[in-house]
Image (cartoon, grey):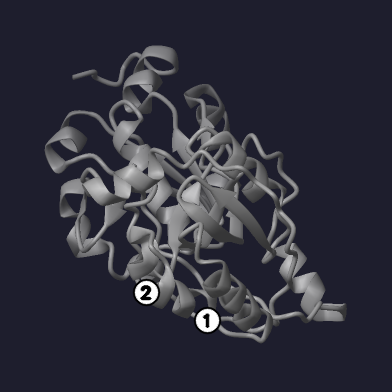
């Protein structure tokens, strides 16, 4: 996975302090608190990925920490619509938490009360949490099954949208909240892509992106693809939504599928709703569809 800080580069290893907490996050989950937040939105800035080891994620509006108000009518429908009906095995969730020491019972009770009264979990995490994620308002980033310890996953993936649950770990007491959800980037096989490309309507409507470098494009290319070289990421990424429509189906190509997956994940994190990684890249297209396309 990658994270964006102006350029697209491999995520660095987390700090030792962050590792010590995240690696030992073997939770004894007791989800006893269920609270729903008010229906207003707030923007977050860039978040670290120390707790879970990195990942791209420029986030759209999140829902703030909860108060004891249950949404109804149109507000509730809007919130539910933002969460897909996909299975836990495929979906990714955006997780926020707050951690205090196990013997800080009074502090934990106070923080819980303040959340019930409507204070932001992000503000409380920044001030009181002992997890390194406190500097990011307790945000742990986008995670999927297999990336967190089983007990933590069980609580997080069972939580309703914008719900807060309470749990105990060997590190102390947590308040855990699921802020958002998404499906992972989809792969498309080159045979299916080729079939689609025979349809003029598809070629007119779809956004086809090639993230290889110009010297690679000179050797082999496919018709209809716009070129966004990955090495020039810093030049085209800042205003990508003015160059491409986040509402349209977007297909990303590279040589073998690795770089395209990185960019596809990043595009999804920018709000692109339907992003496909072309599995195997142009190399697979040449081997399986059109041998006249040179390999290199």
Position above or below: 200 against 138 = above
Please rate how many residues cluster around mark 1, counting C-alpha atoms within 10 Å: few if below 14, some from 14 to 19, many from 20.
few
Image mark for residue 84? none
Position above or below: 236 against 49 = below
Drawn side of residue 238 relative to residue 141, left or right: left
> Which is nearer the eye, 215 or 14?
14
Mark 2 and mark 1: Cα distance apart in space:
10 Å
Q: For the point 56% across and 76% down, which residue is it? A: 111
**Numbered label tally:** 2
Q: For the point 62% across and 79% down, which residue is it? A: 115
Q: Secondary structure at mark 1?
A: loop
Based on the displayed image, in which of its 4 quarters is residue 257 positioned? top left
Q: Secondary structure at mark 2?
A: loop
Q: Position of residue 212 (x, y in %)?
A: 23, 39
Position above or below: 53 against 73 = above
- Residue found at the far right of this picture: 73
- Residue found at the far left of this picture: 215
Image mark for residue 42? 1
> Which is nearer the eye, 239 or 163?
163
Drawn side of residue 214 relative to residue 75, left or right: left
Q: For the point 37% across and 47% down, which residue is it? A: 21
Q: Are marks 2 and 1 in contact (CB under 8 Å)?
A: no
Q: Which residue is mark 2?
A: 45
Q: Position of residue 84 (x, y in %)?
A: 71, 52
Q: Position of residue 167 (x, y in %)?
A: 62, 53
């Amino acid at each position: 996975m990658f994270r964006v800080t102006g350029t697209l580069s491999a995520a660095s290893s987390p700090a030792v302090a962050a590792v010590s907490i995240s690696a030992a996050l073997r939770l004894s989950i007791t989800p006893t608190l269920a609270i729903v937040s008010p229906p207003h939105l707030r923007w977050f800035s860039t978040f670290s990925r120390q707790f879970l080891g990195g990942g791209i994620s420029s986030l759209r509006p999140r829902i703030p920490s909860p108060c004891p108000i249950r949404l109804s009518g149109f507000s509730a429908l809007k919130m539910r619509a933002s969460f897909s009906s996909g299975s836990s095995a495929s979906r990714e969730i955006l997780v926020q938490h707050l951690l205090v020491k196990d013997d800080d019972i009074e502090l934990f009770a106070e923080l819980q009360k303040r959340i019930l009264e409507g204070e932001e979990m992000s503000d409380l995490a920044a001030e009181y949490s002992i997890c390194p994620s406190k500097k990011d308002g307790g945000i742990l980033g986008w995670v999927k099954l297999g990336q967190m310890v089983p007990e933590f996953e069980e609580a997080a993936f069972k939580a309703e949208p914008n719900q807060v649950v309470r749990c105990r770990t060997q590190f102390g007491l947590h308040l855990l909240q699921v802020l958002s959800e998404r499906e992972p980037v989809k792969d498309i096989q080159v045979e299916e892509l080729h079939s689609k490309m025979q349809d003029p309507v598809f070629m007119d409507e779809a956004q086809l992106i090639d993230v290889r470098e110009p010297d690679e494009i000179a050797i082999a290319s496919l018709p209809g693809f716009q070129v966004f070289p990955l090495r020039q990421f810093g030049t085209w990424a800042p205003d990508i939504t003015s160059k491409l429509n986040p509402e349209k189906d977007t297909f990303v190509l590279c040589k073998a599928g690795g770089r395209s997956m990185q960019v596809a994940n990043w595009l999804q994190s920018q709000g692109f709703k339907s992003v496909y990684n072309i599995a195997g890249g142009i190399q697979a297209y040449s081997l399986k569809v059109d041998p006249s396309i040179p390999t290199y």
